[in-house]
Image: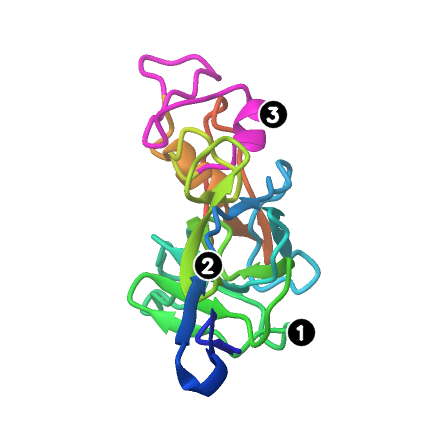
Amino acid sequence: FVKNGVMQGSYESAGAGSALYWEVSWDIDRELDIDTTLKAIKRNWRPEHDNVANTLSVTATVEQPAVPGKFRFTLFDVTREKGWAMNAGDKNDDSLDLEFVEGLDGFLAPKETPDGWELEANRTMTTATVTIKANDYGAWGKLKCETNVDGEWWPCKSEDGKDYVTIPYDEDENKIADFWEERKGISGDAAADDDETPKGREPGDGFSNYEEYRGFQIEGVWRDTDPTEKDLFVHNES
């Protein structure tokens, strides 16, 4: 029989006239070396405030051996920006900027942690997919995954060998999506303010690369700005 993931049993026999008697028992534990992969995420996804159509799906798979396990996903190091853009939203609201979409098939309800969320499957499977939504245009965090097989938790490895992936895709982990930096022709320091045009005595416009990425609400519509061009905002309160 199997008890707690271990096959156990016994056998006994007696010889003629009970002159010979022996008992054999066994306790066999399955030895595994689980290889679980956390698949790469979409490189051109960026967070948006409360847009149900702009979610991100991430998949983990037990590769070798393909033994079903119970998955657990954890969002951690999640940002808590106030509001949802540089000049929009409740400036007293510093709730988590990323979260799991609730009601995912095969999963229990997400549980909030001090720096993110935890989501655990309610059954075993060989492949699991979770969906993440953003609450801020500058949202950022990390996602890791584990799978429980035979009572032991095994970490999922990303395709580049890490224990997690960044949300959004961000190799240098400066909290700006890499594809946005590539499109704007910048990289590196998120705090940099090096706008060159129009030419002046000093570069920069007072907004960091990250702030221009996070964006502004302008005449009721959100938009990001160009970190290579100086921006000037004029607000008429009347």
Label 3 sits on residue: 183
The chosen color scheme is: rainbow
Q: Gap in Å between the C-alphas at discs 1 and 3?
A: 36 Å
Label 2 sits on residue: 84
Q: Nearer the viewer, residue 156 or 33?
A: 33
Residue 90, x across and y down, in percent: 40, 68
Disc 1 marks a residue whose amino acid type is Asp
Label 1 sits on residue: 105
- What residue span does the magenta drawing correspond to? 176-203
Provide the secondary structure element on which disc 2 rests: loop
- Answer few, some or many: residues within 10 Å of disc 2's Cα (few below 14, many 20 plus, some between 14 and 19): many
Task: Please say if 147 is above or below 155.
Answer: below
Disc 3 marks a residue whose amino acid type is Arg
Overall secondary structure of the magenta section: loop
Q: Are marks 3 and 2 in contact (CB under 8 Å)?
A: no
Q: Gap in Å between the C-alphas at discs 1 and 2?
A: 29 Å
Task: Please say if 126 is above or below 63.
Answer: below
Residue 180, x across and y down, in percent: 56, 32
Task: Please say if 222 is above or below 26.
Answer: above
Sequence-wise, which precedes: disc 1 or disc 2? 2
Q: Which residue is pictured at 43% across the width and 21% down the height?
A: 195
Q: Is residue 55 left or right of residue 118?
A: right
Q: Which residue is pictured at 60% across the width and 57% down the height?
A: 67
Q: Is residue 195 magenta?
A: yes
Residue 71, x across and y down, in percent: 52, 63
Disc 2 marks a residue whose amino acid type is Trp
Name the residue furthest right: 53
